[in-house]
Image (cartoon, coloured by chain):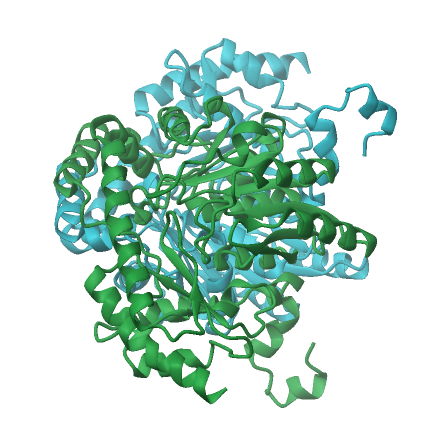
Chain colours: A green, B cyan
Amino acid sequence: MPSEPEIALGRVTPALRHESLFSERAANIKQSAVRDVFDLSLDPSLVSLAGGNPYLQSLPLDKLGAMASELIIEHGMTALQYGGGQGTPELRAQICEVMAEEGILDADPANIVVTTGSQSAQDVACKVFCDPGDTILCEDPTYVGALNTFEAYQARVEPIPTDEHGMIPAELAKRIAELRAAGATIKLLYTIPNFNNPSGITLCAERRPQIMEICREANILVLEDNPYGMLRYTGDPILPLRADYPDDVIYMGSFSKILAPGLRIGWALVPEHLQRRFYLASEAVTLCPPTFNQMLISEYLKHHDWRGQIASYRDLYAGRCAGMLDSLAEFMPESVSWTRPEGGFFVWVTLPEGIDTYPLLAKAIDAGVVFIPGAAFSPADTPSNKLRLAFSAISADKIHEGVRRLAPVLREAIEAR
Amino acid sequence: MPSEPEIALGRVTPALRHESLFSERAANIKQSAVRDVFDLSLDPSLVSLAGGNPYLQSLPLDKLGAMASELIIEHGMTALQYGGGQGTPELRAQICEVMAEEGILDADPANIVVTTGSQSAQDVACKVFCDPGDTILCEDPTYVGALNTFEAYQARVEPIPTDEHGMIPAELAKRIAELRAAGATIKLLYTIPNFNNPSGITLCAERRPQIMEICREANILVLEDNPYGMLRYTGDPILPLRADYPDDVIYMGSFSKILAPGLRIGWALVPEHLQRRFYLASEAVTLCPPTFNQMLISEYLKHHDWRGQIASYRDLYAGRCAGMLDSLAEFMPESVSWTRPEGGFFVWVTLPEGIDTYPLLAKAIDAGVVFIPGAAFSPADTPSNKLRLAFSAISADKIHEGVRRLAPVLREAIEAR
């Protein structure tokens, strides 16, 4: 609180007056490094390997446009009106069909909550389960947006070591024991098991039940975030964690990567015994998800070959991923390594130890290319010798050019070490 | 935690196992009484005076349909893609024009954050300012959705007495002093100054600076929720609180009542010194508001006479309000009184003291009419002799029939007292 003399002098700015009003959690709410770079990536002179935007050009825009128009003209009274807080029954039933494609065969529409993108599902999960100081486990590295959401709830986020097969079960068990011994209250494990953002790594089939049994034994609920699951373009599909553990997993899906992120429609499939609280918490945030957007997606799923559309995305992203891997092989210095994703949008590049990729970003921008430094994907924001390259949004030619521009920046850093 | 013998007996249900995982706040997240009634009001044999849905029939649906179609076909790559977390620059500039109609002339698009309905703006405000146990002041009665949101943050909600001119400044000052003396940390005052939901009452011009000065003196930030402000159909317009107190008010607006709630687009105009934290907190919840919905509203504002559309809404609701007031005068027992709103969607009906309107709801439903009991609009859910009647969604004929059905239910309760 400002002192009396300050007030007398008229020196109290609104910012000073209101400083004491912020919640404790407000200090934890930070700018996402990805967002900073997102703005940059709009500069057309730069090749952006930063943003993980999906490729939308192949969508049936004429058809979608006609559906939107008909929805408003024929069903505007419903589409433009308030709807139920849980989402429309039709879309929830269709979401069950979408999840069946991934091997979740027992989902009940009653246990689905439609959300404003799956980001909002993460927010609601925190609201329902995390008190300040509670611990959430995640992969190291993990999705920067989830980190921002978790930190806004003053959760402690503890990264678990991963290798090329995903989170390491022994490391998970060890870390849980250590954290518990130190008095931590571990509530959730957040995982992107398929084609992780940012690493592109997939949790192998063998480890999935191991991870689940460790969490179940430790009474930790699993948040399975699977936006990229249907975008596998090589290797055998692996069942989601949710498939065999319906009581222990909140499964989060999204139409952002298989249809359109601009509609902001995601969902959570919640264990029946947790459904009510999850749904009410979601309602307390947004009242209801946008009716029109839900109905448009329902029309699309009903009247378009969405499976064929996803198959065409798979082919497209497979080509871009191959282009990325070939370009990396062509241009990268010998001491640089990278992941070989079987799906999704991202490759994770590792430089020799001791190099921090964050200061390299400015040099890369000078060279005409943008990436996301690895530090963004860890809770501590500690210096990292990794970086994320996205291949989803631009053509193989542009990817080639971007990697060509990036290589000398990395080479110089390695030589200067 | 379940005991070892329980585990040995295999008696541990998932619900039991996970009970310890809920956050403290989860227990505060309740079913909205309005929502229960909302489901009921879909029964076509009932006359619903419950739901405050806006009337959408007069919208230019053909035009909106054509705009939606063109947006997707011509600008789908932008409209269906991720956008900025703060909302599109175009819509934020247009929102300034909308607010100028209400007398806010100095709004800067940079200080606007577009949200998933204004409900989400309330959620973000709590996130940024309220720690568990902090106090939020509000009108008695107030919007049930805001109560649900505030309680999800474990805020203490303290209703301030109102009369026919809105919140009573002397009561506000007195309550602040009492609460402070009892050790409360008061962060926010939440108010719907125009045509309050549920009471229909408007805070008179004379009291507005008084309320603001009391809050400023006490260092309490004001959340001004003004979804109905442009729907004034009688009396002189009154400047929003925000107009003269730009540093001390977070102003919340919405397209739900002036265009379409199914698009879920609202906004907050945030004092410059609070903008960054508010925006980042909003981004942590939803990443970005739906791009397509924002662009559709921009097209509508650009190419349609939206002021004329609002004027026609005003005429329509004025007629329905008159129908409601006439019907009440015709049918209500003498000991019943009600408010005479100058705008908005609601009339607030007061029965003699000692009558609880909640048990009357079941009888009203038997008689073929639905209302919302007054208890829903107070934080304590204490028995109330009030009830809310909405006149926004149905014709004057139906309103007349609904009030005709309601009257004997109330009469019987009064006689049985």
Task: Say if residue B83 shows up in the picture.
Answer: yes
For the N terminus of chain A, the image quarter is bottom right
Residue A224 placement (x, y as % from top left): 53, 41
- Residue A88 lies, with reference to residue B269, above or below; the image says above
Residue B361 placement (x, y as % from top left): 56, 18
Query: Residue drawn at (57%, 61%), measured in percent from left and top?
Result: B128
Q: Which one is in front, A356 or B89?
A: A356
- Residue A31 lies, with reference to residue A95, above or below; the image says below
Work out which residue is located at the far front of the displayed protein and give it.
Answer: A334
Query: Residue drawn at (29%, 62%), measured in percent from left and top?
Result: A326
Task: Say if residue B205 shows up in the picture.
Answer: no
- Residue A417 lies, with reference to residue A251, above or below; the image says below
Residue A124 placement (x, y as % from top left): 55, 44
Please tell me how many numbered marks the rendered image carries.
Answer: 0
Residue A31 placement (x, y as % from top left): 49, 68
Q: Which one is in front, B67 or A314?
A: A314
Q: Looking at the rendering, which quadrant does residue A254 occupy? A: top left
Tell whether A217 sits left or right of B317. right
Q: Looking at the rendering, which quadrant does residue B9 occupy? A: top right
Q: Which one is in front, B388 or A203?
A: A203
Q: Looking at the rendering, which quadrant does residue B151 occupy? A: top right
- Residue B172 lies, with reference to residue B341, above or below; the image says below
Tell whether B176 sits left or right of B208. right
